[in-house]
Image: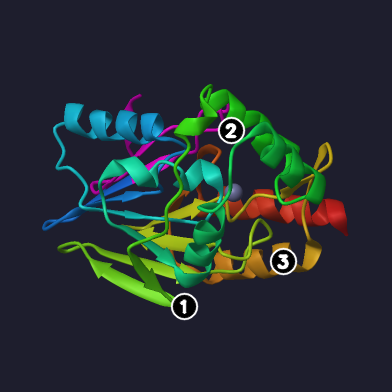
Amino acid sequence: MKLHQLTNRIWYTEHDSTTDRPTLGYIMGDRRSVMLDAGNSGAHGELFLEAVRRAGLPRPELVCISHSHWDHTFGMASLGLPAIASEKTNALLLQMACWGWSEREMAKRLETGEESAFCDTHIRLEYPDLSRIQVRGADIMFQDRLTLELGNCPLELWEGVSPHADDCTLMLADGVLFLGDAYCSVPVGDDWVYDKDLLEKHIHMVEETDFRLCLKGHHAPQTKEELLAELKAELEKIK
Ligand SMILES: [Zn+2]
């Protein structure tokens, strides 16, 4: 896994669709560094920390979580880093921490719609041994907004509107917006679908946010203009 440098202070590792591993971010302030999203397993998180070590960068002291979905959070339990998440995200994590991973329990969640077929498939690919799944809550929770001063590098976190999930935290530092999956649609059967109203509100929020580049959970980085053009084209398809 290679760490790519995006700006003087921001690095990231690429997403990998094989087992649905998302992009993970790294921000280096003068005083401390943080990791953005925890990875979909201990193995994913460990590869990220190894890439940070190999790049000669300081080990992150905290991990900030974009939303509760498994692929962004199941790495939390073994990273050994305090995790920051919104109260909404934390509540969802605590719910998932009670889930069992037997065939019967997984099948039941598919039946009730608590879990999507897409996630079920990829969880099984990432975890040949499902008993290794560990889910835990965050260590530091916030509501609405939070600023972390990393040393001449403020990191802003806020709860934003998203068509993907109602617990999306957006993160902004050094002109880079870390979106997690906030820009994504949701799986409905075999299709990926946008809610029109939420997509409109999300586009408005992106327009109002001052940034130059963005990091996306499951796609390559883009400029603000590229992201907005893409989201507006998606909105046009619904109209
Ligand atoms: Zn997601």
Secondary structure of the residue carrying numbered label 2: helix
Q: Quick one: quadrant of the N terminus?
A: top left
Q: Which residue in the structure is indicated by mark 2?
A: 123
Residue 142's image quarter? bottom left
Category of crowding for the residue at label 2, using alpha-carbon neighbours closer than 10 angstroms: few (below 14), some (14–19), many (at least 20) = some
Q: Is mark 3 on a helix, strand or loop?
A: helix
Q: How far apart are marks 3 and 1 (CA)?
A: 18 Å
Query: CB of mark 1 within 8 Å of CB of mark 2?
Result: no
Q: Mark 3 points at which residue?
A: 198
Structural distance between the alpha carbons of marks 1 and 2? 30 Å
State the residue position of label 1.
144
Q: Are marks 3 and 2 in contact (CB under 8 Å)?
A: no
Residue 59 shows in this picture: yes
Above/below status of 137 relative to 190: below
Amino acid carrying mark 2 in the image? Ile
Quadrant in the rendering for residue 7: top left
Identify the secondary structure beneath mark 1.
loop
Q: Which of 74 and 203 is in front in this view?
A: 74
Q: What amino acid is found at the position of numbered circle 3 in the picture?
A: Leu
- Indicate whether residue 16 is drawn in magenta: yes
- Lower sequence index among marks 3 and 1: 1
Question: Is the magenta region chiefly helix, strand or loop?
Answer: loop
Residue displayed at 52% across by 54% down: 224
Asked whether, in this view, residue 65 is left or right of residue 2, the answer is right
Total marks placed: 3
Residue 158: percent from left, percent from top: 45, 70
Part of the protein shown in magenta: 1-25
